[in-house]
Image (cartoon, helix red, strand yellow):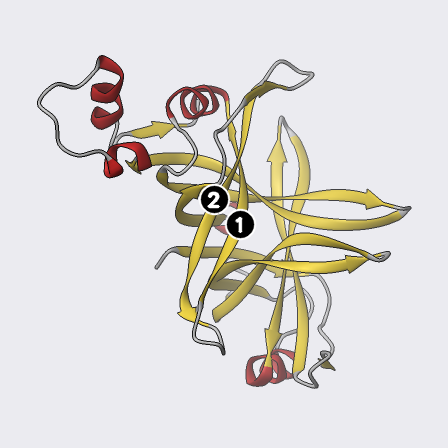
Amino acid sequence: MRNLCTFCGKVVEKSELKEDEEGKKVALVRLSLPRTINGKESEEFIEFTARNKMAENIVQIVNKDDVLAVRGNLITNSVDIMGTNINKLEVVPSQISFLDKEKVTDELYQSQAILIGRLVKTPELTTTESGKSVTNITLAVTRDEKNEEGVYETDFINVSAWNGSAKTVSEYCRKGDLIAIIGSFYSKKNEYKDVEYDTLNISANKISFLSTKRYDEEPEKEEKTTKNKKTKDKKESEIEVA
């Protein structure tokens, strides 16, 4: 499994059964995940589209305020907004379970994404207006199944690393390095040509260095520079978010 996501949330509204451009049955499900940040209550929203038989079942048995646990995969999908293609992160559900909403506590409203992929470009460290360090990285993640043409497609998934992990990733990682990320979702409101839309984003909680492209491609040599030795030593290392 190269990418996996799990999350638990409350259904915002009952879904309607519709048809996509290919005539297949679909149902959009929007979940709310309560949050408390700096003593203030808020919520994140995660949307996913169920298809075919799963869509029919959701429309029949899932109601507003039901609590669902979802397991699935992540892909990037191009969406047309005012004539412009916008790449959005999308959840493809594989398993959906009901939870007893009378027994669900706030601690269960969690989300997690696990990704393994190669860096599309060398990370760059930036600083927010509030003084926090952040590095925005893009992972090339190969899908587990072939498409109709028999080809393994690749998704380009954006992840934000913060504070200590942002500094370490920008210092040691380069384009082509293979890394694993465990992160959580957060939603963000965007606007394009006066059209508002939500995007699903990932914030890294843990980053593991699996291998570097430079080290993998180099032949074994007895003499290594200090820089190459550090690169080798960091394989399998982990960074906790500060």
Q: Nearer the viewer, residue 108 or 168?
A: 168
Quarter placement of the C terminus: top left
Marking on residue 25: none
Categorize mark 2 by other alpha carbons within 10 Å: few (<14), some (14-19), many (20+): many
User: Horizontally, is 109 left or right of 56 in the view?
Assistant: left
Quarter placement of the N terminus: bottom left
Q: Which residue is depicted at the point 42% across and 26% down?
A: 169
In the picture of the structure, the residue carrying the numbered disc 1 is 156
Relative to 187, residue 17 above or below? below
Marking on residue 139: 2
Q: Nearer the viewer, residue 237 or 232?
A: 232
Residue 82 sits in quarter = bottom right
Which element carries disc 1, helix, strand or loop?
Answer: strand
Q: Nearer the viewer, residue 213 or 86?
A: 213
Question: From this viewpoint, which residue is outermost toward the left?
Answer: 222
Q: Which residue is depicted at the point 71% across and 78% down?
A: 20
Q: Which residue is depicted at the point 66% across and 84% down?
A: 24
Q: Position of residue 19 (x, y in %)?
A: 72, 82
Q: Position of residue 37 (x, y in %)?
A: 62, 31
Relative to 160, residue 60 above or below? below
* Residue 140 in view (yes/no): yes
Q: Position of residue 228 (x, y in %)?
A: 24, 21
* Residue 101 in view (yes/no): no
Q: Position of residue 42 (x, y in %)?
A: 68, 40
Amino acid type, mark 2:
Leu
Instruction: Tell me which label, 2 or 1, sits earlier in the chain.
Output: 2
Categorize mark 1 by other alpha carbons within 10 Å: few (<14), some (14-19), many (20+): many
Which element carries disc 2, helix, strand or loop?
Answer: strand
Q: Which residue is depicted at the point 55% across and 24% down?
A: 134
Amino acid type, mark 1:
Phe
Q: Are marks 2 and 1 in contact (CB under 8 Å)?
A: yes
Q: For the image shown, how many numbered marks are present on the structure?
A: 2
